[in-house]
Amino acid sequence: MKKLAAAVLLSTIVAAPAVASDMYVGVNVGSAKIDASNLDSTTSFALLGGYNFNNNFAAEVAYTDFGSKDYSGFTLKSSAWSISGVGSYPFNEQFSVFAKLGFASTTTDTSGSSTDKSDLTYGIGGQFNVNKQIGIRLGYDVYKVADPSSATFDQSVASIGALFNF
């Protein structure tokens, strides 16, 4: 999945001159939380790129680093590569709401042990367009992550970010 996501992102960048007016890149920062007891929130960062097919549908590729946290005896770190379809409903030229549904490949590292998980991802949010080139996005996304014992948990991320349209 990581190689596929990297190939899609690279091909998107290479094809940029032909479809530049419909492409965007963005960055998000937020708070990530695994739904397991006794685990604190971490700071997450994401880089993303997408293509708007029209005003209501886009495809998006993202890399999200959920951050790391040291607990007594172990360190927890997780990240994800994802590809999603984004459906949006614009209320006017400045404000829209969106929902995302896609596929993510997550990696969770715990003190020398690494566990991968591939599953669906989804999210919701809103976007305010400052102008035609810059948008501000608030979002809430959910990913599936696994621990070394193969137990699955939800990794939720509340974030704010900026999009830059070409």
Image (cartoon, rainbow, N blue to C red):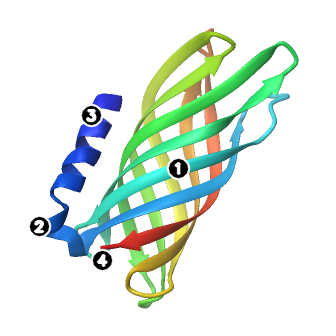
How far, Cα to Cα, is label 2 from label 1?
26 Å
Residue in front for this viewpoint, 151 or 135: 135
From the image, tell me which residue sits under label 1.
46
Q: Which mark is residue 4?
A: 3
Disc 1 residue crowd, few under 14, some 14–19, many 20+, Cα 10 Å: some
Secondary structure beneath dot 2 equals: helix
Which amino acid, mark 1?
Ala
Disc 2 residue crowd, few under 14, some 14–19, many 20+, Cα 10 Å: few
Q: Residue at x 52, y 43 (%)?
A: 64
Q: In the rendered structure, which disc, 1 or 3, sits on the residue that comes first in sequence? A: 3
Labelled pair 2, 3 in contact (Cβ < 8 Å): no
From the image, tell me which residue sits under label 2.
18
Looking at the figure, which quarter contains the N terminus? top left
From the image, tell me which residue sits under label 4.
55
Q: Which mark is residue 56?
A: none
User: How far across and how far down the image is residue 158, in percent?
Assistant: 65, 55
Residue in front for this viewpoint, 44 or 144: 44
How far, Cα to Cα, is label 2 from label 3?
22 Å
Which amino acid, mark 2?
Ala
